[in-house]
Every structure is written in structure tokens, then in C-alpha cells.
Amino acid sequence: DAGVIQSPRHEVTEMGQEVTLRCKPISGHNSLFWYRQTMMRGLELLIYFNNNVPIDDSGMPEDRFSAKMPNASFSTLKIQPSEPRDSAVYFCASSSTANTEAFFGQGTRLTVV
Amino acid sequence: AQSVTQLDSQVPVFEEAPVELRCNYSSSVSVYLFWYVQYPNQGLQLLLKYLSGSTLVKGINGFEAEFNKSQTSFHLRKPSVHISDTAEYFCAVSKMDSSYKLIFGSGTRLLVRP
């Protein structure tokens, strides 16, 4: 398996624009996570899906952030409108009961100018 | 709720010296424990995990960690480090359910000098 695949790897956008980050989890995994990494706050869990259903979105910072998982092989994290303080590295991870660990993608480095 | 404390933000050490990275956790329920490593501009890679059983856990790249329930600690050790071990190390916990939803510590940067 190719692992968790995220796209794009880098994104630079202007304040106010919509940004969509994409994630393809490992085939067969039934849990998917979106994390955000910043110098100030470290690694924060934004949202967690199980069997394509959002279970815990308490980490989503505000209404400008939304996440979807239309099927078991794809998820998106959308920021609309984007702000400079959203600049961070966003990681997607997936897991399954059989593996007893979460596997991380390479991350998307988002810069909002 | 769970929380993880990594007291050392940076640990400098000379090549071939031993190293210990400290991790303490707080939780009202039993947890699984993990150490992840992040190399520059990379994702997180699992080093080792404690789920149950022996409290001494061995991982990849010669790392090991010991779970101490009474001290709520899960310190990471390596007897002899290499330059290539320079990276950010994260301790994490998850509740004992099937989600493996991770709560991370703030990370410790290991800097190995020649």
C-alpha cells in the first residue's frame, strides 16, 4: 500500500480564498483523523471520522473549517474563507483496529498570505 | 480527558552517547502509549507503542521505552545515538478503544552533534 496520501503537499493562497485539502486513507482503514501542526500549539486533533461518519469535531477551530468523508477512500478539509492564522501543516492519518496504530500522511503545508 | 507532558523542548547530545526523552501523561482512564518521530518536512512515523503486557517496549532504530504506571511515565531511551536520529519526537496517548485517536505532547527536538 502507498500509505496515506495527501494533496497538495504545499499550498499558498491569499487571505479570503477557499482552500481544500485532500486525503486518501490506507485501504481497509475505518478511522480517519485530521491534525494541525503549528509552532505555538503543536499537534492538535481537528476531527475524527469512523466508518465515514464524523465522531468528534470538537477540535475544529471555527465555522470556517469543515470536513467531509463522502466514502471510505477520500476525505477533504476545507477552509473558507482562509486567514493568515490558518497557516500550518495539516496532517491526515488513518487507522484500523487490526493495526493498533495511526498512520500519517506527509502533510500539507498551508501558507495564507 | 487525557494530556501529555514532554518537559524537554530540546535535548542536545553527542553522537554515540545515550539519551532519554521524558514523557509523562495524565488520564482518568487506562490508555495506550505511543512514541512517534518526525524528520524534517516529513510526516510522523511510529517508533513504538505500549498496549499491554511487558512494560519494556522495543521499537525501531534501537529505541525502547518503559511504561511506569505509578509514575504515569513513558520515557524513551536509546543507548547510543547517531547523527541520523536528529528529529522531533512526540509522545502520545489514546484511550483504550478502537479509534487510536491520539493526544500528543508538545514534542522534543533531539539534536545529535558529532
Image: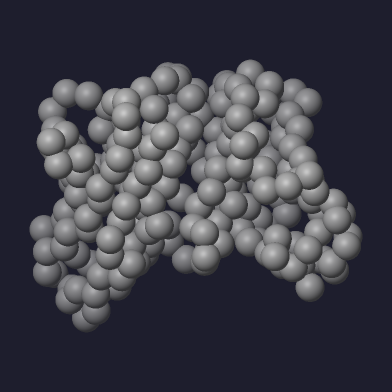
- Please indicate, yes or no, whether residue B42 appears anywhere in the rendered image: no
Camera-side residue: B90 or B73?
A: B73
Camera-side residue: B45 or A87?
A: A87
How many numbered markers are drawn? 0
Picture quarter with the N terminus of chain A: top right
State the residue at coordinates (19%, 73%). B13
Q: Is residue A31 left or right of residue A66?
A: left
Image location (x, y in percent) of residue A38? 56, 62
Vertical comparison of B9 with B102: above or below:
below
Image location (x, y in percent) of residue A5? 63, 43
Instruction: Indicate the quadrant where residue A30 lies.
Output: top right
Q: Is residue B23 left or right of residue A24?
A: left
State the residue at coordinates (22%, 81%). B114
Picture quarter with the C terminus of chain A: bottom right
State the residue at coordinates (88%, 62%). A16
Instruction: Indicate the quadrant where residue A18 lies.
Output: bottom right
Q: Is residue B26 left or right of residue A110?
A: left
Image location (x, y in percent) of residue A34? 61, 41
- Please indicate, yes or no, whether residue A77 appears anywhere in the rendered image: yes
Instruction: Indicate the quadrant where residue A111 lies.
Output: bottom right
State the residue at coordinates (22%, 58%). B21
Vertical comparison of B94 with B65: above or below:
above
Image location (x, y in percent) of residue A26? 58, 31
